Amino acid sequence: QSFTKDSKTDFSAQIADCKNKGAELVFLPIYYQQASLILTQSKNAGFAPKFFGCDGLDGLTSIKNFDTSLAEGVMLLTPFAADSKDQATQDFVKAYKAAYNDETPNQFAADAYDGVKILAKLIESQKITGDMSASDICEKLKAGITAADFSYDGLTGTGMKWNANGEVSKSPKAFVIKDGNYAALDN
């Protein structure tokens, strides 16, 4: 089932169709704002399948006025978990919370952080300077990020590499939401 720009707040037709067909698992390749509406409307319709999504769902439990108990059991793939025990993540979360009124960062914040760090590493390794043309800077960035010897260990992955098309290779992490927190899914 899909939805359009004009119908991204009322999912009753999609929910009814899934319910009538006996769906046991619903894949949500969408952002957390729409997912919160789907979870709420599913509850109201008496439809309780397993829900599975990807990194767009990261942030689901932080939506104001959303009954986070509805997210209980939602499974998702995301490259970042704010409660990871590694020091880099702990330092990032602490600094982010200090800067943003104790808000917990999601994978979008971690991706942005990694993106800036990756650019800084490329600027240094490619010897990019402010007096270069925009075209020359772009060419050096592309050459650097797709070089066989370039990789990056960050908040959203270790050993990240980019192919000739600029597509990143990194492993997602699987989680289930339990008690409002991410718990690693081992299987």
Image (cartoon, rainbow, N blue to C red):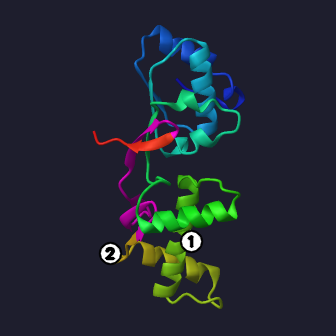
Eyeballing the image, is 178 above or below 43?
A: below
| Residue stretch in magenta | 153-180
Q: Earlier in the sequence, mark 2 or mark 1?
A: 1
Q: Quadrant of residue 144?
A: bottom left
Looking at the rendered structure, the kind of residue marked 1 is Val
Question: In the rendered image, is residue 140 in sight?
Answer: no
Q: Nearer the viewer, residue 65 or 47?
A: 65
- Viewer-side label of 2, 1: 1
- Badge 2, how many Cα within 10 Å: few under 14, some, many 20+? few
> Which image quarter is the C terminus in?
top left
Where does the image place residue 185, in percent across and percent down from the top left?
Answer: 34, 41
Eyeballing the image, is 42 above or below 171?
A: above
Image point (46%, 52%), residue name: 81
**Mark 2 sits on what residue?**
148
Where does the image place residue 64, in percent across and percent down from the top left?
Answer: 70, 38
Q: Separation of disc 2 and disc 1 at Cα?
A: 20 Å
Looking at the rendered structure, the kind of residue marked 2 is Ala
- The reply to whether dot 2 and dot 1 touch (C-beta < 8 Å) is no
Q: What secondary structure is marked by label 1?
A: helix
**Mark 1 sits on what residue?**
116
Question: In the rendered image, is residue 68 in sight?
Answer: yes
